[in-house]
Each structure stands twice: as structure tokens, then as C-alpha cells.
Amino acid sequence: MSRLEPFDRQFRNTARGMRRRPPTDAWDRIEGRLDRRTRGRRWLGVRPWMIAAVLLLVAGFAVVLSLPQQGPGNPLAQRAQSMEELEPGSVRPTSRLPTYPPVAEGRPDGYLISRSEPQARLAVAPKYRL
Amino acid sequence: MIARCIANDRRAQRAVYEQFSPLMSAVARRYCRRDADADDVLVAAFFRVFDKIHTFTESGSFEGWIRRIVVNEALMLLRKKHALTQASELGDVNPSYYAIPAVAAERLAERDILNLLDALPTGYRTVFNLYVVEGFKHREIAELLEISINTSKSQLILAKKRLREQLEKLGYAR
């Protein structure tokens, strides 16, 4: 408290003791504002603990979904899994036939020569010769 | 009572309002020349009181806490109306020259106080109210009103000069 002169002190005491009749509608206006505030909060209806609970649920679901499935599961699910493996692109084509080098050339009399096979095995039977 | 107000008990809030509103209405009126402005300040202040009542600590006076809110609301209204922008600073002035005889205040009636304050420019009235009636220091007033400490002191001296003139006119200071 600052040092007050005698006039200030007297003025202060008188001023602080003053009363004034508030307007008749003041309480209604205050109550109206309080009601609007309450409605607003109720409409939002969101409390911090609610947000925390929702976040926990979402995080829980995410963790469960990301876990690898262990043990014998549903046969249908297993089948679906095996079918997924056979999808195009995921399977390499298997070639059961050995790759033969193409016939290099033939003779005008129909005698075929291969580079890899012995000449005798590729000889055309006499009845088919031209 | 305060606990019930925190729980949003409307009857408790009404009781607090009934108890403190005559005093706080007078506080608001000391800062605002217009009755309508004082009423707006009162409504805004009590709304804030009930909105922030959970922040009130039992260590201080509840009445003082409400009074502080009313004063802040009044200052906000004055700032909104740009009523506090004009502030002048005096040079070397001897405050004792503007001192008012104590005998003048002893005979001062309540209704004259409002008339005297209403006759002061807004800046003078605000500083006078904050310093003399609320008991703020010039440093605190300077922070509240965003003015320099010297300006706050100057406004107080000028307010007292005007008051002295008014009191002489009313026949109090003779």
C-alpha cells in the first residue's frame, strides 16, 4: 500500500463503502451467459479423459492388427494365404523341357545338323529322305 | 458456498451475486461514467467470476478477488473504447501544490464522490481510482494501463488539481 495523504485516505474509505443498486436484468444476463457456456460445453461433450480413452483404443487395435498370427489358424485363412502365394507375378514359370539350341542349318538334301546332338541321332530315316 | 459455485450450483451463484453485486456495481461505476457501461462491466465481471471461480485460492479475500476482476473488466472496456490513449506527462511539479485539505474529504458525501470523479477526464479518473481507492502503486498502474510510471504520477497530480478546483467550487475546500 502506498503512502496516502489524509484526503486520499478519507476519500478511499468513503469510496470503498459505496453501494449501488445493480440493474434488475443483470442477473438474468449473467445466468444467460452461464447457460450458454454450459450448453456449449455439453454440446462439445468431449472431456480430456474421453480423448485419452479413444486414443488408447485405437492404439490397441493397431497393435493387435500388426502382431503376426501364430499357431494353427483357420483353414480357410490358410488356404487364402496359399492362394495369395500363387498369384501372378509371385510364381516363377517352371520349364520342364530342356532348352535345345535351335537347328543351325540343314543341307539341301534334307540332312539336318545340330550343334549339340550327335549327328547320327538326328539323321532322317531313309524312307523320309527326299 | 464457493465449492457449490464451482459445481455450477445456480442458487449458490445467485447468493454470491446478491451479496457482492451492490458493492461491485459501485466499483464499476467509479470507472465508467455511463451507467450502461458500468452495468455491462458488472455482468461481464460476474460471468468471469463464476467461470474462473475454480482458480480462486482460499489464501486471499474472496471480495478482493471479485473486486480485482471488476476493475480488470472496467479497464478492458475503457481500452476497447480507446479512453485511455490520451495521457500527458508533466515536467517538474510540486505535488504539495495540488494537495487537498483533509477536512474537505471528511465532509464529502458519497454522491459527491461520483460527481467529482465524473468531472475528471477518463485517464485522470482511472489513475486516481487505481492509486487512491484500490491502493495500486505507480509501477503497477503503469503496467496495467501500459503507460510510463511518470505518466501515471502526472495523471494523479492532474487529477488532484482538478479535484481541488471542483471541491472549491462545491465549497468543501474552504
Image (cartoon, coloured by chain):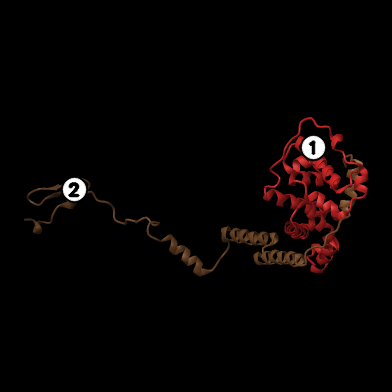
Q: Amino acid at mark 1?
A: Lys
Considering only vertical position in the picture, is B94 above or below A61?
A: above
The percent coordinates of residue B91 (x first, y second) are 76, 31
Residue at image mark 1:
B153
Residue at image mark 2:
A114
Whether the residues at callouts 1 and 2 have beta carbons within 8 Å, the answer is no
Left or right: B165 as drawn, with respect to A58:
right
- The tint chain A carries is brown
In this rendered view, identify the residue nearer to me: B60 or B31. Answer: B31
In this rendered view, identify the residue nearer to me: B46 or B126. Answer: B126
Q: Chain of mark 1?
A: B
SS of the residue at dot 2? loop
Q: Amino acid at mark 2?
A: Ser
The percent coordinates of residue B25 (x first, y second) are 80, 58
Residue A90: quarter of image: bottom left
For the colour red, the matching chain is B
At label 1, counting other C-alpha atoms closer than 10 Å, the crowd grade (few under 14, some 14-19, many 20 or more) is many
User: Can you see residue B14?
Assistant: yes
In this rendered view, identify the residue nearer to me: B170 or A81. Answer: B170
Left or right: B102 as drawn, with respect to A43:
right
Looking at the rendered structure, whether the residues under marks 1 and 2 are on a common chain is answered as no
The image shows a total of numbered marks equal to 2
